[in-house]
Amino acid sequence: VFETVLFYQSLLTQAVSTQYSSVGGGFALGLLLLAILAWVLIRFSVKLPIAKFFSATTYLLLALAFVLMGKAVSALQEAAIIGMTPLPVSFEIDWIGVKSTWQGVLAQLSVLLVYLVFLILSKSKRATSPPITQASDFKRVSVTASDAD
């Protein structure tokens, strides 16, 4: 909740008076979409393939991390906190945060590299671990009050 309030405070601080209705409209649309998503999840939760759902959200978060990394590096460059070394080829894809600087491209590639490392590690872990075939394969863990201290 705090991040959302901070985000909207930043939007309202940067907006001119004619843009306040756009910020409010975006907020209202976000609430409406959130309510629709909650209704869909509650209504169809029995039929929701949870593995596919989390797989899709993983890719959405990866895309968000990629965009935010590019925009963060760009903002730090504009504030002259980090350097700005242009690439030999000039290009920009602003909606995904790609700018033609070495710092931005390398930072975004590092996000993809971290994802690939975790993907490879998770696939190798799944390949070496035996499949769970029945409920008794799960280990039971009990926690008592003395364990919590």
Image: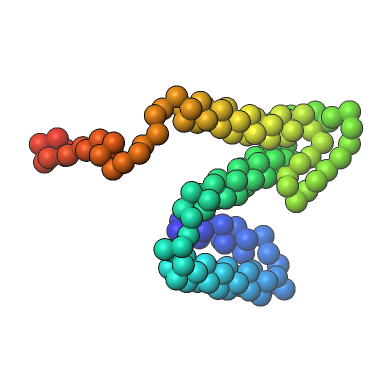
* 12 to 118, vertically: above or below: below
State the residue at coordinates (11%, 41%).
145
State the residue at coordinates (69%, 40%).
70
Q: Position of residue 60 (x, y in %)?
A: 60, 49
Return the residue nearer the eye: 90 or 135.
Answer: 135
* 85 to 74, vertically: above or below: above
State the residue at coordinates (80%, 46%).
93
Q: Position of residue 129 (x, y in %)?
A: 41, 27
Q: Residue furthest right?
A: 89
Q: Is residue 106 visible?
A: yes
Q: Position of residue 34 (x, y in %)?
A: 52, 67
User: In terms of image quadrants, where is residue 115?
Assistant: top right
User: Is residue 106 shown left or right of residue 61?
Assistant: right
Q: Position of residue 61 (x, y in %)?
A: 57, 47
Q: Is residue 27 visible?
A: no
User: Is residue 111 shown left or right of residue 128?
Assistant: right
